[in-house]
Image: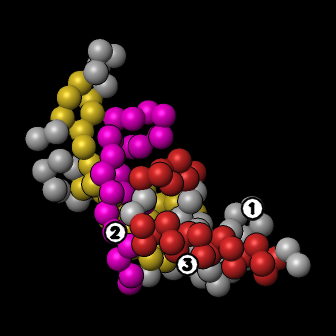
Amino acid sequence: MATWTDPNGTLHETYSGSIFVRDEYLGTFHYDSGDAAYGWNRAGLAFFCPTCGEIWARVVAANASGRPQEFSVLRAHCEQHKDPWDIPGSILRESFANRLGDLPFPALRRELTLHLNYYEKNHD
């Protein structure tokens, strides 16, 4: 198993995160669950739209043994509803935004397309 403790006593473990938007699988990435710089709390993420109430995206976290972890709920508008602060439908929220370089290509492609379309639509 890929677990270790650093000199500060923080437990580190290699986790995997599998990304789903609606029913589409966008790949899996691996990360250090004890990396405080990224705010990982060893939980999956469920993206909840406060307008329609739908869980429209998920990042399923699994520990080094492959066991899925519980979810934290992240308030994030889906693509169909306006968001006054962020791009609707983007999974780049809170500490997850810091993982852009770790995301699998299909997730990156989706984010790029979403951001470009949003910019073109709102910045004529």
User: Residue 80: which quarter of the image?
Assistant: bottom right
Amino acid type at mark 2: Gly
* Residue located 42% across and 67% down the image: 105
Q: Could you say where residue 87 lies in the image, as x and y percent from the top left?
A: 68, 68
- Looking at the rendered image, the disc whose residue lies closer to the viewer, 2 or 1, is 2
From the image, which quarter does the C terminus lie in?
A: bottom right
Q: Is residue 24 left or right of residue 122?
A: left
* Residue located 22% across and 50% down the image: 63
Q: Which residue is mark 3?
A: 53
Q: Are marks 2 and 3 in contact (CB under 8 Å)?
A: no
As drawn, the label of residue 94 is none
Amino acid type at mark 3: Gly
Circle 3 SS class: loop
Instruction: Tell me the magenta residue range.
Output: 23-45
Towards the viewer: 27 or 49:
27
From the image, which quarter does the N terminus lie in?
A: top left
Q: Could you say where residue 18 lies in the image, as x and y percent from the top left?
A: 32, 64
When the figure is inspected, residue 8 is found, relative to residue 39, above or below; the finding is above
* Residue located 39% across and 81% down the image: 24
- Looking at the rendered image, the disc whose residue lies closer to the viewer, 2 or 3, is 2
Q: Which residue is mark 2?
A: 27
User: Residue 106: which quarter of the image?
Assistant: bottom left
* Residue located 52% across and 74% down the image: 110
Q: Choose the circle earlier in sequence order: 1 or 3.
A: 3
Amino acid type at mark 1: Trp
Towards the viewer: 28 or 11:
28
C-alpha distance separating marks 2 and 3: 25 Å
Q: Are marks 1 and 3 in contact (CB under 8 Å)?
A: no
Q: Choose the circle earlier in sequence order: 2 or 3.
A: 2
